[in-house]
């Protein structure tokens, strides 16, 4: 869930500890989706300021910068190999056929565009889950030590190679939507041209998601350069962003409305405005951010195919509830009027993110007091009041908590409480999950099936 990868950001062995199933670390403007422990200590932007005593609510939502998964339970290369070799001939044949079909036709079997509102579409999604730490994996070390293929990135942060059987396991468990984080700058040429091989591989997985009856939210993930470079080179950075989305939109233009595009992930302009230190630069930061979302809508709507009517997910400033519920944040102008708003929820960060005490807070291993639940419900109500009640559906694109330093019952209570509150307030919750989290990607099943059954039954 982190916002971007920069050189020397990751360990050479590829381990990027991201919160288990839902683990996130308090890293901000840059690689918000990196390892829980590594992330908190290596992030260069707002890790130390991300959560102050008075900003916990916003920070957790914004903890926009930490998507960690328990490193100790990450699948190893051996596990990935085992999965590949133990897959039955029938599954292999099916996957191969799907791959050929996806690349040759470039169109999913789900190409229908229905006459429904975005609110109706989001309501139909049910409960969702992320395929995290997979196509969003990034780092210069992958370029240096990888083999230059999409698979090198797909498996760099601990995931085995994604198969249709793996995707089917999520669908069979009852999830209605899968968010697919992608770092499109992986294998990208210097002129901004995306890798055809990377696009084809992502397209294959999108097809599997759709063909197994789930919605798919396809985003631009870990592109932290947006927040870092734009304040210094506005036009150049915006043009790069637009060119990337032009290629993505064109590649998926003939897909139906079960595929949604999301503008970006956990981006803000900390060099313009310190959100924890006053209002200087705030207006400029929001104006710049709003222009990026507007460019996203403009590019997609002009790309042809089904894109003029595609439902779009607009990222909030740092995907933080407190920062999105601000009069300076403005939804883009959309001629199709088919947009939803995206926020993340990792609050309080001392419970959801911290695995050990830090200079910005002390570990909280329990959650569930009346005050805790009041804070949660107030945050969800805020999104309902600011957006849902005005006809703009809300998707909680990520939420979760590290499970390393708390009991299983505490972990489950938090996850179920967040999802329940979201549903009760009309929001769509999408769990952050990574290799070594709730889903065993080698066995293609959830490790705590009773818990997942309770989760998906909420809607």
Image (spheres, grey):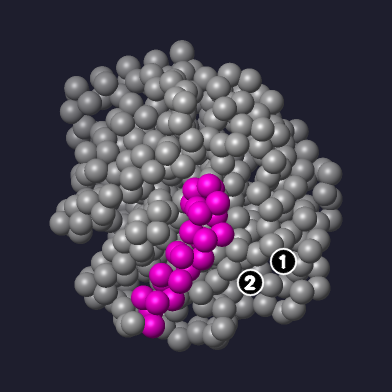
* Stretch in magenta: 371-394
Q: Nearer the viewer, residue 110 or 183?
A: 110
> Which residue is depicted at the point 65% across and 64% down?
326
Residue 182 drawn at (x, y percent) = 52, 42
Residue 433 drawn at (x, y percent) = 37, 54
CB under 8 Å between discs 2 and 1 = yes
- Whether residue 4 sits left or right of residue 37 in the image: it is right
Q: Evaluate whether residue 162 shows in this view.
A: no
Residue 65 drawn at (x, y percent) = 55, 63
Q: What is the CA distance from the residue labelled 2 to the residue labelled 1? A: 8 Å
Q: Secondary structure at mark 2?
A: loop
- Whether residue 360 sits left or right of residue 454 in the image: it is right
The answer to which image quadrant residue 30 occupies is bottom right
> Which residue is depicted at the point 49% across and 48% down?
393
Q: Residue furthest left?
A: 450
In the rendered image, residue 127 lying in the magenta stretch gets the answer: no
Q: Main secondary structure of the magenta part?
A: helix
Q: Is disc 2 surrounded by few (<14), some (14 to 19) or many (20+) residues within 10 Å?
A: many
Q: Which mark is residue 270?
A: 1
> Which residue is depicted at the point 50% across and 84% down?
361
Disc with the residue nearer the chain's start (2 vs 1): 2
Q: Is residue 199 above or below residue 66?
A: above
According to the picture, the residue beneath numbered tag 2 turns out to be 46
The answer to which image quadrant residue 371 occupies is bottom left
């Amino acid at each position: 869930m982190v916002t971007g990868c920069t050189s020397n950001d990751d360990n050479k062995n590829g381990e990027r500890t991201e919160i288990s199933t839902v683990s996130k670390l308090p890293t901000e403007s840059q690689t918000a989706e990196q390892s829980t422990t590594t992330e908190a200590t290596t992030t260069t932007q707002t890790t130390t300021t991300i959560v102050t005593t008075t900003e916990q609510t916003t920070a957790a939502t914004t903890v926009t910068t930490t998507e960690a998964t328990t490193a100790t339970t990450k699948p190893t290369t051996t596990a990935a190999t085992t999965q590949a070799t133990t897959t039955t001939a029938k599954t292999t044949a099916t996957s191969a056929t799907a791959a050929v079909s996806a690349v040759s036709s470039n169109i999913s079997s789900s190409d229908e565009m229905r006459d429904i509102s975005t609110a109706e579409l989001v309501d139909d999604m049910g409960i969702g889950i992320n395929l995290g730490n997979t196509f969003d994996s990034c780092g210069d070390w992958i370029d240096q030590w990888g083999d230059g293929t999409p698979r090198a990135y797909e498996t760099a942060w601990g995931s085995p190679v994604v198969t249709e059987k793996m995707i089917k396991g999520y669908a069979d468990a009852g999830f209605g939507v899968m968010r697919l984080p992608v770092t499109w700058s992986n294998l990208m040429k210097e002129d901004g041209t995306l890798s055809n091989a990377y696009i084809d591989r992502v397209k294959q997985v999108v097809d599997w998601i759709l063909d197994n009856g789930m919605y798919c939210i396809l985003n631009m993930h870990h592109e932290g350069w947006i927040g870092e470079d734009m304040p210094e080179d506005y036009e150049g950075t915006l043009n790069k962003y637009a060119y990337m989305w032009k290629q993505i939109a064109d590649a998926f233009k003939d897909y139906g409305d079960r595929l949604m595009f999301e503008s970006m992930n956990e981006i803000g302009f900390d060099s313009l405005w310190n959100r924890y230190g006053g209002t200087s630069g705030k207006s400029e930061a929001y104006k710049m951010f709003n222009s990026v979302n507007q460019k996203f809508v403009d590019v997609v709507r002009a790309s042809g195919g089904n894109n003029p009517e595609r439902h779009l997910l607009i990222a909030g400033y740092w995907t933080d509830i407190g920062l999105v519920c601000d009069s300076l944040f403005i939804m883009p102008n959309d001629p199709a009027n088919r947009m939803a708003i995206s926020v993340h929820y990792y609050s309080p960060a001392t419970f959801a993110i911290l695995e050990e005490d830090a200079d910005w807070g002390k570990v909280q291993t329990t959650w569930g007091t009346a005050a805790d639940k009041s804070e949660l419900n107030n945050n969800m109500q805020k999104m309902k009041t600011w957006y849902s009640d005005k006809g703009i559906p809300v998707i909680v694109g990520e939420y979760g908590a590290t499970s390393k330093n708390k009991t299983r019952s505490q972990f489950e209570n938090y996850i179920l409480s967040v999802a329940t509150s979201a549903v009760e307030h009309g929001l769509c919750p999408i769990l952050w999950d990574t290799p070594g989290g709730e889903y065993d990607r080698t066995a293609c099943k959830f490790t705590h099936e009773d818990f997942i059954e309770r989760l998906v039954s909420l809607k």
